[in-house]
Amino acid sequence: MLPTEHRLRRREDFATAVRRGRRAGRPLLVVHLSSGATDPHVPGETLPPTRAGFVVSKAVGNAVVRNTVKRRLRHLMRDRLASVPPGSLVVVRALPGAGDADHAQLARDLDTALRRLLGGGAR
């Protein structure tokens, strides 16, 4: 499970990550990354932790399939939070094929998208 302090919950935070961040698309998902140094919701000068949110629409499948995809993505993102700079906002949007994909395929697409966004991969 993704710890509470690392979850994106507010609509404004999702919008910030999608509108102001960079995007990397893969066949199963699209990752938006906004590497903001400060968060207006947190007082003080310390960097907030990296936060991640997930968007899984009805196009992915029924409620059972959507929840399964969300659980898999949360689990995968939990293991990758350390590789993303502190204060970043990450939004992972599942595409329709994600409902039929297994855990390894989702992990491969997430790793590739994050590597591209963090500057480690070629297009």
Image (cartoon, rainbow, N blue to C red):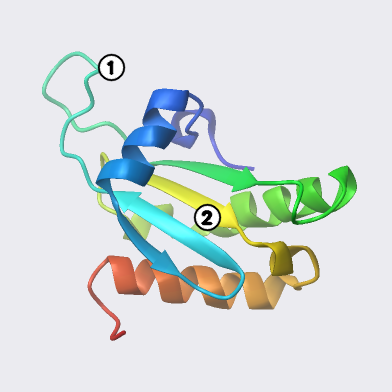
Q: What residue type is labelled 2?
A: Met
Examine the image and state in which quarter residue 43 appears. Answer: top left
Task: Give residue 39's position: percent from left, percent from top.
Answer: 23, 26
CA distance for labels 2 and 1: 23 Å
Figure check: 92 above or below 114: above
Image point 26% across, 66% down: which residue?
Answer: 118
Residue that mark 2 sits on: 77
Residue at disc 1, secondary structure: loop
Asked whether residue 112 appears in the rendered view, the answer is yes
Seen as rendered, the residue at the extreme front is: 59
Residue that mark 1 sits on: 41
Image point 67% across, 77% down: which residue?
Answer: 104
Asked whether residue 78 appears in the rendered view, the answer is no
Q: Earlier in the sequence, mark 2 or mark 1?
A: 1
Examine the image and state in which quarter residue 98 appears. Answer: bottom right
Task: Give residue 35's position: percent from left, percent from top.
Answer: 23, 47
Q: Quadrant of the C terminus?
A: bottom left
Q: Quadrant of the N terminus?
A: top right
Q: Are marks 2 and 1 in contact (CB under 8 Å)?
A: no
Task: Give residue 46's position: percent from left, percent from top.
Answer: 16, 27
Residue at disc 2, secondary structure: helix
Q: Which amino acid does label 1 sit on?
A: His
Q: Is residue 50 left or right of residue 9?
A: left
Examine the image and state in which quarter residue 86 appears. Answer: top left
Seen as rendered, the residue at the extreme top is: 43
Picture mark count: 2
What's the mark number on residue 116? none
Image point 83% across, 54% down: which residue?
Answer: 61
Near-viewer residue (104 or 61): 61
